[in-house]
Image: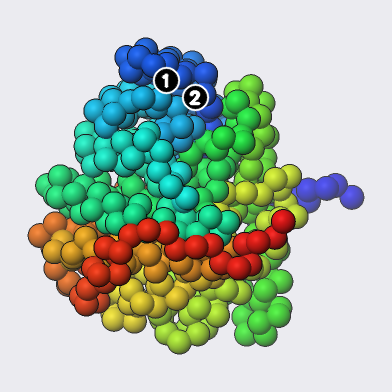
C-alpha cells in the first residue's frame, strides 16, 4: 500500500483550493555575528552584504516551491541576529542607520519583511539594548519592511518593569509618528515574554544566538481546513472532535515539512523548524474565530471561549508534533483581531472584549495581537496592558506578547484599515483607570518559584 494514497492527494488539493491552506511564510534566519565592526558604516555594509548574498534566491525558491507543488507560499521573510547583540558601541543614531541598512537589504532581495531589530532585556539592559529601544520609533517609521521586537521578561529571569515602561512610551510615540497611516508603525513592533529564537512569524521573528549560521523556518496556516473538518464531523462529542483536529493538523503540518525540506536544500541552509500555528487572514473562512464557533459557540467571546481555544490549541500541537522533524516557533492558534474576520465581527457585535482576549491568551499561541485601542490611551495604561500580558507568560512558562495600536485620533467605535494580511481593526475599549504609580516604581519583578529547576 502506498504511503500517500490517492485520497490523501485529493484531500490536500481540496484544502488548498477550497479551504485556504497555505504556507504562510518561509523565513530564512541569518546570523550577523561575523558582521560586527566598531565603525557603523562598515557594520551596515557588512549587514547588507551578508543578507543580500544569503537571501538572494529566497523569493525565487519560494515561487519555485509554489509552482512545483501547487501550494501558495504567501510570504518570504528574513530574520537576523537580535541587532542589539551586534550593534557594538552604536548610539541610537547608529541603530537607525543599521535599521536602514536592513531595510535596504530587504528591498534588494524582494522579501516581504525582515525581523530582528530586537533587544533581549528580560534581566536588564546593555548599552546597546537601551540605544536600540530609544531608536525604535524613528527606525520603524523610517523603513518599510523592518520589524522590531523586545523581550522584556522570561520565566527564568522575571519581568523588567523599566523596559515595559519604555515600551509603553515607544509604542505611543510610534503611533503618533505614523498617524497619517492609521498608526501602522505599531503593527511592526511586538513586546515579548519568553520569546522563541526560531519564530518565523512577524513582527516577532529574530534569529537567536543558539541558532545555525543560516536556517530555514516555515510557518504554516489553515484555519479554514480545520473549520471544515469540524463541520464535517457533525455532532460528535469533544473527545472525538479533538481527534478530528489532531488528524487535520497532522496533514497540514506535513505540507509545511515538505516545504521546509525543499527550501533548505535549494538554498543550502540548515533545516530549522515548522511552526504549526493556525494563522488567520481577513479572508472569509480563514478564521480561528470561526473554528471556535463551529465547535459550538454562538460567538467567540462567549463564556466557554477559553475552554474551546485550549482544546483547539492542544489538539493542533499534538497532531503537528507527529508530522514534523522539528516543531518550534509559537505553534498553536493565533488570535489577532485585525487579521481575523471572525474576531473583527465578534468585537463589532460586542461579544469580544479586551478582557476576554487577555483571558484567552493564557491558552493560545501568543497574546494580545493586532488590537487597536483609542489614540488618546495614556502610555502608562499601555505599559499596564503589556505588564498584565507578560505576567501571564512568565507565570505559565509560555510565550506571550503584545502588539497594540493606539490609533492616533481614533476612538471606540472607529476602525483602522491596514490592508493586506494586516486587515482591519475596530478600536476597542480600554480600562482608563491608571496604573501609573505601579509602573513608575520601576525595577524588576522576580522570577516565579517554579523557575528554580536546576
- Tell me the distance, in whole angstroms, between the alpha carbons under discs 1 and 2: 7 Å
- Report x, y in % for residue 177: 15, 45
Identify the residue at image location x=33%, y=25%: 90
Identify the residue at image location x=17%, y=72%: 413
The residue that label 1 is drawn on is 47
Mark 1 and mark 2 in contact? Answer it, CB < 8 Å: yes
Q: Which mark is residue 66?
A: none
Observer-nearest of 263 and 232 = 263
- In the picture provided, is 45 more to the left or to the right than 447? left
- Report x, y in % for residue 14: 59, 55
- In the picture provided, is 116 more to the left or to the right than 349? right
Identify the residue at image location x=58%, y=56%: 156
In primary-sequence order, the first of circles 1 and 2 is 2
The residue that label 2 is drawn on is 32
Q: Compared to 318, does 8 lie above or below?
A: above
Q: Compared to 255, does 454 lie above or below?
A: below
Q: Quadrant of residue 217?
A: top right
Q: Quadrant of residue 110?
A: top left
Observer-nearest of 233 and 432 = 432
Observer-nearest of 34 and 349 = 34
- Report x, y in % for residue 89: 36, 24
- Report x, y in % for residue 143: 26, 33
SS state under label 1 = helix
- In the picture provided, is 65 more to the left or to the right than 36? right
Q: Compared to 141, does 303 lie above or below?
A: below
Marks counted in the figure total 2
Residue 335 in sight here: no
Residue 126 in sight here: yes
SS state under label 2 = loop
Identify the residue at image location x=55%, y=43%: 197
Q: Quadrant of the C terminus?
A: bottom right
Amino acid at each position: 500500500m502506498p504511503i500517500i494514497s490517492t485520497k490523501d492527494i485529493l484531500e490536500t488539493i481540496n484544502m488548498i483550493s477550497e479551504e485556504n491552506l497555505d504556507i504562510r511564510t518561509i523565513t530564512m534566519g541569518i546570523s550577523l555575528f561575523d558582521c560586527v565592526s566598531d565603525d557603523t558604516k562598515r557594520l551596515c555594509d557588512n549587514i547588507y552584504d551578508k543578507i543580500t548574498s544569503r537571501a538572494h534566491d529566497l523569493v525565487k525558491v519560494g515561487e519555485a516551491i509554489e509552482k512545483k507543488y501547487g501550494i501558495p507560499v504567501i510570504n518570504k521573510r528574513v530574520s537576523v541576529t537580535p541587532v542589539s547583540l551586534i550593534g557594538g558601541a552604536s548610539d541610537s543614531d547608529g541603530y537607525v542607520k543599521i535599521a536602514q541598512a536592513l531595510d535596504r537589504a530587504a528591498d534588494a532581495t524582494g522579501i516581504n519583511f525582515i525581523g530582528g531589530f530586537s533587544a533581549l532585556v528580560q534581566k536588564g539592559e546593555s548599552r546597546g539594548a537601551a540605544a536600540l529601544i530609544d531608536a525604535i520609533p524613528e527606525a520603524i517609521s523610517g523603513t518599510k519592511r523592518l520589524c522590531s521586537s523586545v523581550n522584556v521578561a522570561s520565566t527564568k529571569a522575571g519581568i523588567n518593569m523599566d523596559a515595559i515602561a519604555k515600551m509603553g512610551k515607544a509604542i505611543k510615540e510610534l503611533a503618533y509618528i505614523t498617524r497619517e497611516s492609521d498608526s501602522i508603525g505599531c503593527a511592526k513592533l511586538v513586546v515579548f515574554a519568553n520569546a522563541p529564537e526560531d519564530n518565523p512569524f512577524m513582527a516577532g521573528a529574530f534569529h537567536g544566538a543558539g541558532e545555525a549560521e543560516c536556517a530555514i523556518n516555515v510557518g504554516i496556516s489553515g484555519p479554514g481546513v480545520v473549520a471544515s473538518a469540524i463541520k464535517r464531523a457533525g455532532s460528535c462529542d469533544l473527545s472525538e472532535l479533538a481527534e478530528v483536529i489532531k488528524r487535520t493538523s497532522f496533514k497540514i503540518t506535513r505540507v509545511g515539512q515538505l516545504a521546509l525540506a525543499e527550501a533548505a536544500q535549494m538554498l543550502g541552509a540548515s533545516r530549522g523548524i515548522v511552526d504549526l500555528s493556525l494563522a488567520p487572514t481577513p479572508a472569509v473562512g480563514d478564521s480561528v474565530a470561526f473554528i471556535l464557533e463551529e465547535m459550538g459557540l454562538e460567538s467567540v467571546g462567549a463564556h466557554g471561549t477559553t475552554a474551546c481555544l485550549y482544546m483547539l490549541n492542544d489538539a493542533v500541537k499534538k497532531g503537528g508534533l507527529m508530522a514534523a522533524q522539528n516543531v518550534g516557533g509559537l505553534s498553536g492558534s493565533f488570535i489577532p483581531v485585525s487579521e481575523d474576520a471572525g474576531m473583527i465581527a465578534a468585537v463589532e457585535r460586542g461579544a469580544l472584549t479586551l478582557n476576554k482576549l487577555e483571558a484567552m491568551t493564557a491558552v493560545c499561541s501568543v497574546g494580545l495581537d493586532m488590537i487597536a485601542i483609542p489614540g488618546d490611551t495614556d502610555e502608562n495604561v499601555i505599559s499596564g496592558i503589556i505588564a498584565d500580558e507578560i505576567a501571564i507568560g512568565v507565570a505559565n512558562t509560555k510565550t506571550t506578547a503584545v502588539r497594540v495600536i493606539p490609533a492616533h485620533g481614533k476612538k471606540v467605535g472607529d476602525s483602522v484599515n491596514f490592508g493586506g494580511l494586516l486587515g482591519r481593526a475596530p478600536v476597542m475599549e480600554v480600562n482608563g483607570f491608571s496604573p501609573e504609580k505601579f509602573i513608575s516604581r520601576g525595577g524588576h519583578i522576580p522570577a516565579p518559584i517554579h523557575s528554580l529547576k536546576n
